[in-house]
Image (cartoon, grey):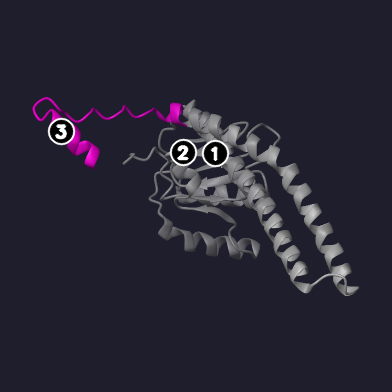
């Protein structure tokens, strides 16, 4: 605030607020996210062996410390310190593995958005079954308020809860600038019995969906059913 005030005071007549930077297209944003996330994931993956080695060393140090303590050659405080060191090493390894999983989710979702961007929007009511995607442009209204009813129907059919992997907006969708507030992702493969039932039920109800078979044909990585309209781009603040 101080710096801005000095600038305006120095030139009160000609100083003008700078024009906002042009927003990137969704394709450009997605490409940027893919590039940076892949670089980030590679960095994380290179760190895993070091975390694993550190954890093994901490295990061995704790084991040796307990042995020496039992023999009366080491104070209990040293054992407690070794336990804390092991817990920290295990936490660092777990955090890194979790970050890799989150990066994989972002990479998959960004790759999916690139594929969807290359496809023409479906006219209302049209159903399309392709190699990696199943799409239905249903015209019936859908919101997160309809989820309990869908969960109940699924539980009646399969005796278990609907496996929702993304409910509304998530940090993955925030990272990609996508509006997922009125959608859910269900972790079922479109070609499984549960996936076929879900897509048939949605289609009969007129609810739009996208069935994702995988990033490449024959792969089940990231397979799910997106319930709701395709996620448009959020308006950046």
Q: Is residue 203 visible?
A: no
Identify which residue is drawn at 24% across, 37% down: 3
Mark whose residue sits in front, 2 or 3: 3
Residue 109 circle label: 1
Q: Would you say 68 lies left or right of 210 here?
A: right
**Quarter-of-image position of residue 139:** top left
The tag earlier along the polypeptide, 1 or 3, is 3
Residue holding disc 3: 8
Q: Which residue lies furthest to the left in this view?
A: 13
> Residue 34: where, in percent of width, then height?
54, 32
**Quarter-of-image position of residue 36:** top right
| Front residue of this view, candidates 54 and 151 | 54
Magenta stretch? Answer: 1-29
Q: Can residue 195 be seen in this view?
A: yes
The tag earlier along the polypeptide, 2 or 3, is 3
Residue holding disc 2: 176
Residue 49 circle label: none
Disc 2 is placed on an element classified as helix
Mark whose residue sits in front, 1 or 2: 2
Image position of 60 with respect to 206: above or below: below
Disc 1 is placed on an element classified as helix
Mark whose residue sits in front, 1 or 3: 3
Identify which residue is drawn at 62% across, 61% down: 157
Magenta stretch containing residue 13, yes or no?
Answer: yes
């Amino acid at each position: 605030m101080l710096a801005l005030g000095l600038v305006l005071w120095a030139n009160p007549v000609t100083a003008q607020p700078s024009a906002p930077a042009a927003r990137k297209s969704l394709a450009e944003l997605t490409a940027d996210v893919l590039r940076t996330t892949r670089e980030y994931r590679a960095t994380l993956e290179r760190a895993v062996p070091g975390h694993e080695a550190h954890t093994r060393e901490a295990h061995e140090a704790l084991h040796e410390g307990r042995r020496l303590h039992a023999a009366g050659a080491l104070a209990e405080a040293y054992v407690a310190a070794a336990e804390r060191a092991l817990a920290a090493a295990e936490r660092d390894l777990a955090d890194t593995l979790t970050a890799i999983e989150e990066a994989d989710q972002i990479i998959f979702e960004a790759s999916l958005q690139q594929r969807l961007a290359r496809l023409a929007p479906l006219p209302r009511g049209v159903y399309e079954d392709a190699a990696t995607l199943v799409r239905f442009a249903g015209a019936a209204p859908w919101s997160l308020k309809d989820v309990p009813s869908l969960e109940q129907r699924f539980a009646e059919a399969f005796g278990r809860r609907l496996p929702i992997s993304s409910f509304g907006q998530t940090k993955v969708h925030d990272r990609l600038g996508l509006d997922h507030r009125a959608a859910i992702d269900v972790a079922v493969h479109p070609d499984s019995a549960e996936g076929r039932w879900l897509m048939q039920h949605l289609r009969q109800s007129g609810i739009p969906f996208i069935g994702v078979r995988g990033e490449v044909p024959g792969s089940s990585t990231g397979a799910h059913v997106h319930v709701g309209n395709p996620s448009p781009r959020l308006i950046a603040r």
